[in-house]
Every structure is written in structure tokens, then in C-alpha cells.
Image: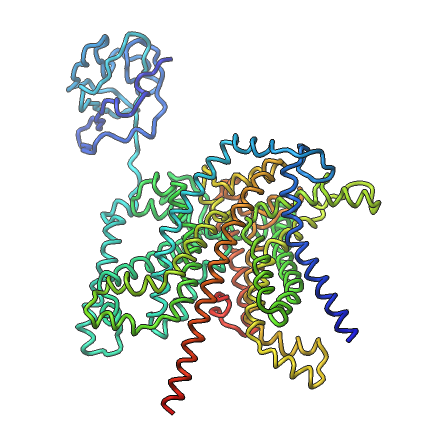
Amino acid sequence: MKSTDILKWVVRGYILLFFLYLFGPLIIMSASAFNTSTYPTITPWEGFTLHWFADLSDNDKIINGLITSLWVGLGVVALSVPTGLAGAIMMMQVHERARPIYYTIVVSPVLVPGVILGISTVIFWDRFGELVGLDFETTSDPFFLTILGQSTFISAYCMLIFIARLQRFDRTQEEAALDLGASHVQVFWKVLIPFLRPAVISSIVLAFLVSFENYNTTVFTMISKGTLVTELAGLARFGVNPEISALAVIIIGVTLFGAIIFEIKKRHEEVLERRAKAEASIERVQSASATV
Amino acid sequence: MNNKTEDGPVELAQMKISPGMGSISDDKPAPKPDVPAPAPSTGSSMPAITPGMGSGNTPQPAITPKIGGAPAAPATAPPPASVGGTNLNITIANPDKLPSLPPGSHELKLVIEQEKPKTDADSGLGFWEIFIALVAALTIAPFAQAQAGKWFSNINAIDFVRRNGIVISLYLIVFSAGWIIFMIVLPQLYMLDFSFRFNLSPSEVGGANDVYTLKNYRYLLFGRPGDEDLLNWLHLQVFVKTIFASVMVTVIDFALCYPLAYYMAQSVKGGNQRLLFLCLLLPFWVNEILRAFAFKLIFAEQGILNDVMIGIGLWDTPFDFFRANVALYTGLTYAYLLLMIFPLYNAIESLDHNQVEAARDLGSPWWRIHYRVVLPHAKPGIVSGCTMVFMLSAGALAAPNILGGPSSLWFTQIIYQWYNTGGNWPQGSAYAFVLLIACIVFVRIMMRVFKVSLGEIAQR
């Protein structure tokens, strides 16, 4: 009895330390945004201020970076969600023997460092564009390159989300709709997409957030412009500045809000699904016992 | 010097220059004005083309447009000007485009463009032709195969179209083929190709110097030819250090996460578990830069850690955590912690707790339960987590930039330098490719050691 009590306390202590490590740095950083000291720290505490937030809103680089980030994020969503969906449907239909190769190829961007994806995108469009006669303006456009570079791996994330959902898709629904005279396009929009709706929403949110926060790929493809994250990295690298802390507070606040909503929705859906599944299995048992 | 002709290329009068012998006539339209040849400055009030140094202000200026607002006189049959022994006929193709020049000092610029060596772009096949042909081929293929399908029953492309309809098939094929070809496969191949080339200026591309070389890889190993040291110690050390440190970060993350993942998966139930999950996920959504910055604040000379430690009296001068790389390793460990915990959790969660109970009832000590029951079951999760953490730390760029010491580099930082300040893309590509190989080798080793497939790794 005694030893299990000790074990319980050890476990609790461990979890406490773990979460301290997880949240401590973020809390310290957030708190330093409200300190009057020009050096962002909480020791010594010199006084409460919102001054750094005002400074932040005057920083043109940050504001422009934010706008760029939003546009890139929208572009990535528009490209990678349909691509991921196509990739997932293909995955389901590719010939059995070709499936491992196909899977290896489409999943590889997830396992390749983002730096390399950025570099290869820039080089490819630079050289390939010249080869096929695309004009230089297009192939060196920061938006064009960044959206393509990020979508390379974000599409793979989306595809994994879609595959997980598609595995539970009952194809007889499609066949029923086709038998009743629906066209393939109608089946796609009225049967498949409604079924995939949670996955579509998840992948839109994920694609946008991952794009918004990406640094490794973006820093190569953005060439001369900057997104919020690359501008932030520039600031954080060369100076320790309370404005960054202020920005951190805003970003943490917004992402926390978004993440909490996203999580709650996801959990909710999972609960619903589990319940539906449980009911289905009960029905199956009942019908099985009825036949017996 | 007010130079009117330089204002805009559109305003330039187009001239035809052809060898005076009359043997070759150049029918091409006027050369593009983006390669300006150095124009001899005459300084006279009359624009004049003065080819060659020796001729100076020849008594026969080739073109003499009227000055003073009046449209320039067409110079249809200009007298030949001599250039290095050969004669050149200079004709103005569209004399009405000649700018009307105000009085003053003017300079006429002679724009000469050499004909570029022919590239594939000139060979008639443009990008869109190829692309349309590809799409057309992919569209027609199923129908062609439908005919063939009468003889070969195992061809399933026709099934593909029959199953999805033409529009949806086209969407599937265009998007997934576009993704695989233009975003995944070709860029990597181009990068590989690029890493075997010399660093050429744009005008040299496709020229005689555009050949393959191992120079870029040789540089990583041996440095510049003629260096004192046999090997390129600086870069090799950075490479080895990056790989080694990434492995260490992976191991530490595993050690930190395993107990918690086990506890969460096997002991916590219901609402508590959901709360734990949410708490774990939140820091994950705060971006990498800010997470690194948070550690910069903690470890800085005036940071909280030094303040507290000096306050306690553990040491009395601020300790430089950046130079000792403590900050970097802590930051990296922190940044990728969560990519380890979720795969581990998912893997351990699927283990039936009764197995653990059974092992315990049979008298197995706790460490053997983990070694013989839990770990073998969690293998796919372990490999998945380790692969992600290793790959992300070896490929990290933000954290080393922000938290790295002044004298230490991360391998990705060298790559970045080759691209930015170094201006040597092929060299950077070679380095990037070496990094890619290192990551692939790591993944292969993990797969071999733990005997799991790639599908199991990525699905978590």
C-alpha cells in the first residue's frame, strides 16, 4: 500500500514538472510583454504597461507580414485541400500492387525537412520555368513559390486526414446513388463531400494553421518578401525586444482560442461517431441474435 | 549628362544592323534592349554612333536625326560605318519612333544583343503543349485501354473512369499527378541535378561550361583545393554535430514522453484525459519562433534563470547558456516534445491493459513488463515519433538561428548561407541533398531495427 502511494506521488510530481516545462516558458514570455522594462523579462518587475502593444501596431513590417501570411494561407488552403482529397481518393483506388510505391511517394514530403522542400521548389521553378518558357516574373513570384512549396507537404497532411475518414466510407452509398440515376459529379458533391465534411473542415483549419506558422520552407520561397513568421524570426534573431513578447501574447491568445474551439468540435464529433458506431454494433448483435 | 534615350526601351528607335558585305541579312526584329553595350560618350550635341575607338568623331555620323522638335528624317540609306575592318549597315526601321530631342547634350546608346545559344525553349515545344498533351494522353488512355481491355482483363484504368465519371476522373488525375510530378518528384530531381553543376551566371547556363561536376560534394569533404587541412573540418564537424545532437534530442524526448504517454494511455480515463490532451495540444499550436524566443528570454544573460541562480548564490557571474549550446538543445527538445508524445500515446493506448496485469501477476518486475510487453507493442509509435523528432531537429532552422551560440552552426544554417549570402545555389543543393540522405538513412535504420513499414510511421 505504501509503495503504491509513493508511486502515485512520483507520477504526480512528474506530470507537474512536465507541464511546468511545457507552459513555463510561454507564461514567462507572455508576462514579459506587460513589463515596462525595455529588456523583456519578469525579473525585476518594473511596472505594468501596454506600451509594447502600441509599438507593435506601428510596426509596418509586422503588419505587412501578417497580410502576406493570410493571403498565403488562403492560397495554400485552396490548393492543398483539393490536392489532398484527390490524393486520398487515388490512394483508395490505386492498384493493390502499386499502392506501397504510391504511398511512399505521397507521404515522403511529411518526412523530408522543410528546408529541402523550400530549396527544391525554388530551384525547380527557376530552371523548369526557363526550360518551358514561363516568364521569370511568375516563376520567381514569392506568393507562387510559397504556396506551391508549402502545399507540397500540407497536401500530404490533408491526404492523411482524408484517408482516415475515407476508410470508413461505405461505397454502397455511391453505388445506390448511381443506380438511382445520379451523375458522378452529383455523387461526388451530394454523397462523398457531405460524408467527408468533418475531414474537409479539419484539413482546412490544419492547412491554414500549418501554412501560417511555417518557417523552414517559407524562408526560402519568400525570397524578398516576408510573412509574419519570417519577419518575427528576423526580429527574434537579432534583438531581444518586448514587441516580440507582445506579439506572442496576441498569437498565443488567438491560437489558443482557435485550438480550443477546434479541439472541442473534434472531441464532440468523435463522441458522436463513437456513439453511432456503438449503436450500429448493438443493432448488428440484435439482428444477429434475431436471426438465430 | 541628360540621357533621353535611356528613359524607356519603348522609345528607342529600332535599328537594323547588318554586315555591309550584304551576304547575310538579319531579319530578326530589333534586339531586346535589356543588354546594354557600353556606349561611347561623344559629348557632342549631335547623337552619333561612333563605332571603334580609333574612329572617334568621324566626319560621317551614321544617323543624324533632326533636332528641335521636328520628326526625325528617315535615314534609309545611311553611309556605312566601319567597325574593326568590317562594314555595318545601320538602318532605322521605324524612324517615326525617334524621340524628338530638345537642344542640349545627348548621347545615343547602341544596343547590341548577341544571339543566345539555342535552348529547349526555342525548339518549338512549349510548356502548355507538353502539359495539354499529357492531360490528353491521360484522358484518352482509358478509352484506348477499353479496346485493349477486351483482350487484357487485368487492366483497370477503364474501371477507374467508369467508377468515377469523366469529370471526377480528370480532377483526380490532374490534381494528384500535378502534385506528384510537379511538386514532389521533379523538384527533388532538379535539386539533385543542380547539386552536380557549377555555379554559373544566368548567361552561361546551357553554354559550354554547363557540365556535371562532383565539385560541390568534394567541397563538403575536402574543402577548397589547396587548403592546408586534408578535410573540410568545419563543415564536417557541423554535420556530425547536427546529426548527433538530433539523435540526442530524439532520445531525450523519448525518455521524457514515455512515462507520461504510458500513464495517460493506461491509467487516466474520461474527463481528466481530455483535459490532459487539451493542455498538451495548446503549446503545440504556438509557433516555433515564439517557442524559441521564450527560451531566449529564459537563458539570456539578464534572463530569469541567471537572475534566479545569482540570487540564490549558485554562481555569481551570468552563465552563457548560448555558447554552451544548452539553450539550443533545450529549445529543440521542447519544440518537438509533442510530436513524440502523441504517436507514443496512440500506440500504447491500443495495448490491452490485461496483458500488463497478466505479466504482473506472473511475477514480472516493472522494467521487464515495459521491456517485454509495452515497448514491443508500441514499436510503430516509437518509430513514428523518433522519425518525426529527428527529422525536424536535423532540419530545424529557426531554433538554431535564435538560440544557437555565436560560434556554433547548425547544418541547415550552412545551407541557408550558401543560398543567401554565399549566392552559390548548386553548393547549397549539394548540402541539402546530403541532409536529405542523412534523414532517409535514419528512417531506414529505424524501420530496419524496429521492423515497421513506412505506412505505420506516417499514419500516426
Q: Quadrant of residue B267?
A: bottom right
A273 lies left or right of A46: left
Looking at the image, which is closer to me, B277 or B253?
Answer: B277
Q: Residue at x 64, y 37 (%)?
A: A34
Residue B311 appears in the figure: yes
Looking at the image, which is closer to me, B75 or A153?
Answer: A153
Q: In which quarter of the image is residue B45?
A: top left
Say if B175 sits above or below A127 in the image.
below
Q: How many labels does the image show?
A: 0
Say if A85 sits above or below A228 in the image.
below
The residue at the far right in this view is: B313
Say if B279 sits above or below B322 in the image.
below
Q: Quadrant of residue B241?
A: bottom right
Q: Quadrant of the N terminus of chain A?
A: bottom right
Say if B27 sits above or below A218 in the image.
above
In the rendering, at what x and y percent does residue A181 appear? 19, 69
In the rendering, at what x and y percent does residue B80 appear? 21, 20
In the rendering, at what x and y percent does residue B452 appear? 52, 73
B136 lies left or right of B211: left
In the rendering, at what x and y percent does residue A17 appear? 70, 58
The residue at the far bottom in this view is: A292
Q: In which quarter of the image is the C terminus of chain A?
A: bottom left
Q: Which residue is drawn at 70% across and 41% down?
A: B300
Residue B24 appears in the figure: no
